[in-house]
Every structure is written in structure tokens, then in C-alpha cells.
Image (cartoon, rainbow, N blue to C red):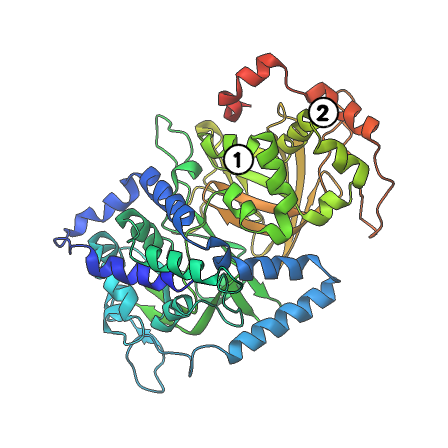
Amino acid sequence: MRSVLFLVAATAAALATRDDAKRDQIVLIENQDSTADANAVQAWWDAFPNPGSLLSSVEERITKSIRGSKLDNFLSLADSDSDDEDEGEEGNPHLPHGGHGDDHRHEDKTIYELIKDSQHASKFAKLLEEHGEIKQLLDDEEHNYTLFVPTDRALDRIHGGHHGHHGHHGHHGDDGGNDDDGDRKHRHEKPSKEFILAFLKYHIVPGLYPAHRIQTSRTLPSELHPAALDGASTRRHKQHHPQRIRAFTVPIVHLTRLNFQTRLVGPEFHAKNGILRAVDFPLIPPPSQTTVVRLLPGQFSTLALALETTGLGGELDRLERRGGGTLFAPTNRAWAALGPRLNAFLFSDPGRRYLRALLRYHVVVNETLYSDAYYRGGGEHDHDDDDGEDGDGAARVGDAGRGYLHVDLPSLLHGAPISVDIRTWKEFVSIVVNGFARVDVRDVVADDGVVQVVRQVLIPPHKHRGAHGDVGDENEGKSKREMSVEELKARLEPYLETPETTSGRDNMGDL
């Protein structure tokens, strides 16, 4: 954990300062190779010595969201955020260098000028100086942006090996010395210029997002545009879909977290060209869906094993996407609810084909469904319901904090539909899959789409009758009878891959 700050700081010190770009070069940011950013982000996660430690708080909060009653969840989340408030920045740092009684409006300065003058964001300012295109973006007076800037102490928290109340990881036991050796070795490896550029872009949100707008948002668009999320090119344009940031605000107490672990601290500052908010932990661009699953074993070890056993995980990583994808990820408890007989069969050699078919029903490619935005890869199907300066090309779910959306997503299992109903009201959202399977944790962002955490394993419909599976219906908190092995085989048999379909796996994304 100590290596992250060193990586960022070392890169800032090592990279040669670019010549000042002309103001009209700002448009280049929109046209840069997003593939390079995506490859650099995944390479950084793959090379980091203990990547799971970066997501430890994510896993903890997922666990809290899944366990207990809704009231218990609310009280637990509110209590943990209150504890973090006590551990937060001393005095809630004023990023711009101003005196007490400041009304937090500095409309004579741009966002970049405020950061440059701040005594609390010198490390982030250093990175901006080394990346002229981002510096120019935040100095642009013709467009508005919202910037989440990690304070120096926020970077120090990663450098110290923990965030908030989370302890040190990977330094216990007999092999602790080896971990330190590996850590020291990795600390001398600089992250690529492309990764730092993606890191900076991910902290920038197009448009104005004051506190009340963030609190009623479930995801926020960023200036980072991974290639996997891009829509198909049309004669009119190529749709660039932004990487989103998950937002969650605890109702009533209005405490907001971004990507589970990043907390807004202090007031918002209004600049000439937007809003600046300090955060207590950096927003690290997310890895791929399969990497997210692999790095959260406390919830997804069974799913990770299934993806590896069937080879589907590797195929998904190599798949060329248009519009990202949606992975409905059953938790370990969801797999356990199938019962020991079904699990024993699925993870046996005879059951592997059936396990692969079952997994394919949890995967949607070229369509990314968040709780408040919907990306579709086909150019002729793209939505552009933008209602502000965001320009993210996403279909909206709801209006003014309330709404309903029904979507039938084509799964990777020969297009077998996954029915999704999203209902929203203010800060609350309910996502139900196939009429009964609830999404327990929404919008776990990934480089190539989104992960929606479901409390049940999804069973595909009868191919000719169209009825969805009824295993583990928990609408009333009680599971139905376990499905037998023969029943599951009969349900999946029509979907099993033949030698002909197996030879066409490279074209999975067209299903």
C-alpha cells in the first residue's frame, strides 16, 4: 500500500515537463487514443503488488450492504461514515489559500489557478504541471467542470498503507519480509504516462455538480473515456462514453462516498469555470470486470473460480467491446443457495459445459446498464438525452430523482433475455432482475462496463416457454425448494455450445 503515493510522486518528478500547449489543443483530449488509457490502467492494476488491498474497503461496504435488514444497513453505513468524519482532515482543509470566513467563491480564478495556489493540493498540482493538456482543460474559461482533488493528506493515506479505519495489509505472517521486498522493488517502477493521464481525467467531471446534484446522483460521468465503453462509429459521429464514478449518499445525514471509499471533505469552492471539491482518497480508474471479481474474494471467490474453470473469464478479457458490458455477479452466498448437489455437479468435469452456459447468462456485452445511465454500443441505438453540459451520450433513468425503466438485455447465452426493472426515488433505487432477483449492490464500475451484484444465481428461461428460473426466490426472505440437477440440466441443455458455436467464440460480442 505504501507504493501508490511513491508511484504518483515519482512519475511527477521523473516525467519531463511538456511545452505549454496552445489553448486550442484542449480538443485533443477528446480525440486521444482511449485504448492507450485503458491498457495503461489495466497494466497498472496487474502490476500493483497487492491490488486487493486497494479494494478492501469496497469489499467491506459490499458486505455491509448485503447483510442484515435495510434499517441495520442504513444505521451501519451512517455510523461508519460518522466515524470516518472524526478521522477526517483536521479542520476540513480549505484547498484555496484563504482566510476564515471565506464564502468559498473565487470566481476571479479558474480551477487550475485555485489548485496552483493551494497549500493542501501541492502533489496533485505537480501532476497537472507535468500534463499540459489537463492543465489547459482546467484553465479553460469556456466550459464548466467539477474537479475532485485529492489533498496531500489523501495521497499520504495511500502512502501509509491504509484508508480511514482500515489497517495495513499484506505484512503479516512469515512471508511479510518477502512482501516488503516486492513492495520495495515495485516502488521503483514508475507508472506510465498514460496511466497518470487517465488518473487525472478520472477526477474531472464535465459540467457543474454542486452538493445537491451529487447527492441525488447515483453515478457521475468523468473525462476518462475507455475504449471498451465507446459506441460504434456512425456517419455522423463516434460516441465516446465516459467512465463513470459511483456515488452514494446516506439518506437524511447526506454523507457522500464516491466509488465506495472516497469521501467528500470540506466545502465546495466555486471558480470561474466550475466547482472544486476536496476528497480524502484518490479516485483510481477501475480495472476490468473480471479483475474486480478476482480482487474481491470475500464476495466473489466462487464466481472467480467459475470464470477460470470454464475459461470464460479470459475470453471476456480479450473480447473487443462496443459500449462496454454488464456483468450480473452472484455472491458466494448466492452460489451456496443453489445447494451442495448443484454446486458439486456444476464444478465437476461433466458439469463444466452447463456451468459455462449458466455463466454466459450473467453476461451482457456491448450494453452497459447503470442505475441511472444506459450505454448501448450500436451507433444506431445510441441515446443522447443529455440535459446539461455533461455530453456523456447516455440514456437517463428517471427525472428529478424519480423514475422507472424496464430493459430486456440480451445475454451472452445466445441472446437469452435478462429482464431488468429499475425504480428510483430521490436517493433510493431498486433494481430487480427477471422479476425477483434483487441487485444488492449497484454500479460497481469497471473499465469495460459495470458489475451489478445480485443475491441469486440467474437461471435462464425455458427456451420455448420463456419462463425464468425460480430458484431461491427471496421476495419474502425465504428460499423456494432447491432445483435438482436433472431440472437444471434440462433448463440449460438447449443452450449448450456445439462444436460449431464453440469455434465462433471470437464473435461472442455480436450475440
Q: Residue 15 appears at what percent x and percent y?
A: 20, 55
Report the residue marked by disc 2.
350
Query: What residue is at 31 percent from the left and 40 percent from the top?
Result: 36
User: Quick check: 393 above or below 152?
Assistant: above
Who is closer to the viewer here, 220 or 35?
35
- Mark 2, Cα crowd under 10 Å, few <14 / some 14-19 / many 20+, is few
Report the residue marked by disc 1.
367
Q: Please name the amino acid that badge 2 sits on.
A: Pro
Res. 321 in view: no
Who is closer to the viewer here, 361 or 442?
361
Query: What residue is at 66 percent from the left and 69 percent from the top?
Result: 76
Of labels 2 and 1, earlier in sequence is 2
**Quadrant where the N terminus is found in the figure:** bottom left
Q: Residue 378 appears at what percent x and percent y?
A: 47, 28
Q: CA distance from mark 2 to mark 1?
A: 32 Å
Q: Quadrant of residue 249?
A: bottom right
**Quadrant where the C terminus is found in the figure:** top right
